[in-house]
Image (spheres, rainbow, N blue to C red):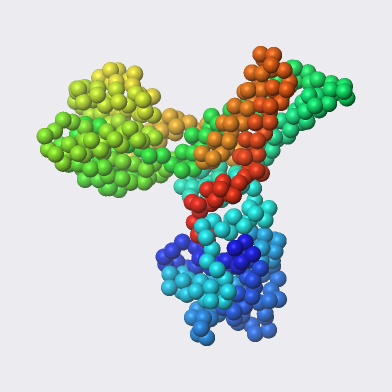
Amino acid sequence: MENSTIAAIATPPGQGGIAVVRLSGPESYAVAEKVFRPADSRKQVADAKGYTALYGTFVHGGETFDDGVALFYRSPRSYTGEDVVELSCHGGDAVARRLVEACLAAGAVPAGPGEYTRRALLNGKLSLTQAEAVMDLISAGGRQGAALANAARDGALARKISAQQQILTDLQAHLTAWVDFPEEDVPALETDALRASLEEVKAGLDELIENYNAAAVLREGVDCAIVGRPNAGKSTLLNLLAGFDRAIVTPIAGTTRDVVEQAVQLGEIRLNLFDTAGLRETDDPVEAEGVRRSWAKLAEAGLVLAVFDGSSPLAKEDLDLARRCAECRAIALINKEDLPIQFDAEVIAPYFAMVIPVCCKEEGARKVIAAAVARLLGTGRIDPHAASLSGQRQLSAALRARDGVNGALDALATGFGLDAVSVCVDDALDALYALTGENATEAVIDQVFEKFCVGK
């Protein structure tokens, strides 16, 4: 398949100004010549230079069905490193699908998920970490998340890992020569210098690993459960964060009986909000099922916003909720700040990272909550232009590399000898090469691209 010419729609489905069908492979120009007729009859597709465009019409089965523009890219100066032609037609599913059908009839084959980026990887245009960043950039919901992905796509992570690899490679070369060729009188590494080099690599890995969760939140968002007793203001909070009346709000307890979902952008963080049924004991089987789902959603969520009615005294259900939040990343919101406060917030404070008085009816509460969420999730300390890890594959490799470096430091400290240090450095290097994809197996590459969209 790698020598075939692939075709796919590269723009989202639905109506739009234009749709783009992308061709990549050795026969891209030949396929384009069969489906595209330049308006200027003196122009020929086969002669088109890279980074040029032609206006013309699209044909299929002898019929002209649309007009548009063809953009040409010559190998190796294209995204995939192959000959590429991008055909821009009028937006709309019917026209775009027919253009793809015309390309397939002319000799192209359908592209698989992520196949264009995969070819860019295999042709040396991108590293594996840069390829992963492409999908992060596509799915980024906020500016900081997009900046993180763009930094990785530009090679920030690859450069940082490469620097660490170089330090360990230099160490390993010296260690190997000292262990394997004692007759050559290779000088042993000074212990202090060896320790300093290992600690430098460890510090870099520590920073990447410690920032992983916060960076993941900026890239991917976080599931957030809104929980509390009936009439505490959960649905009012959902509507405040959503910016419109997403949930029904009434003074009748038990109005929300099932989980209501809504994705919102809160500052730089995308929250997948789950407004849950009010937590209380009930004989109503429908409401009871809603309460069960509320507890389940609290346990699953990456962030909990626990809403308490500040105008009412602390109840048993409030204390039960607070205790359950002790093991979560949770913020207590003491709602109805505009009314006389009767709620004793000090009782629940030990169970939460923060306790914040708010009025969920007022727009100003949105900024207060956004700042608290960013502080709790650590997104404020992230430099969006710095290197960062993305996804469990990269995190797992970084953890293995750090384990190797820690093993080398332990071997050095306990006097096991430089041969033991060398084995641990080898393990760390293997993990770093796995992170960058320099020794990635076909299975690993398949795993990376399985979540890509078709056309990218």
Image height check: is 274 above or below 189?
Answer: below
User: Which quadrant of the structure image shows residue 333?
Assistant: top left
Residue at the location (49% across, 67% down)? 19
Residue at the location (24% across, 22% down)? 319
User: Which quadrant of the structure image shows residue 305?
Assistant: top left
Q: Position of residue 343 (x, y in %)?
A: 23, 22
Image height check: is 152 above or below 50?
Answer: above
Residue extending farthest top: 414
Q: Position of residue 243 (x, y in %)?
A: 33, 46
Residue at the location (53% across, 29% down)? 210
Q: Position of residue 22 (x, y in %)?
A: 56, 66
Residue 424 left/right relative to 178: left
Residue 138 visible in the shown view: no
Image height check: is 28 above or below 260?
Answer: below
Quadrant in which the N terminus appears: bottom right
User: Which quadrant of the structure image shows residue 92?
Assistant: bottom left
452 or 52: which is nearer to us?
Answer: 452
369 or 451: which is nearer to us?
Answer: 451
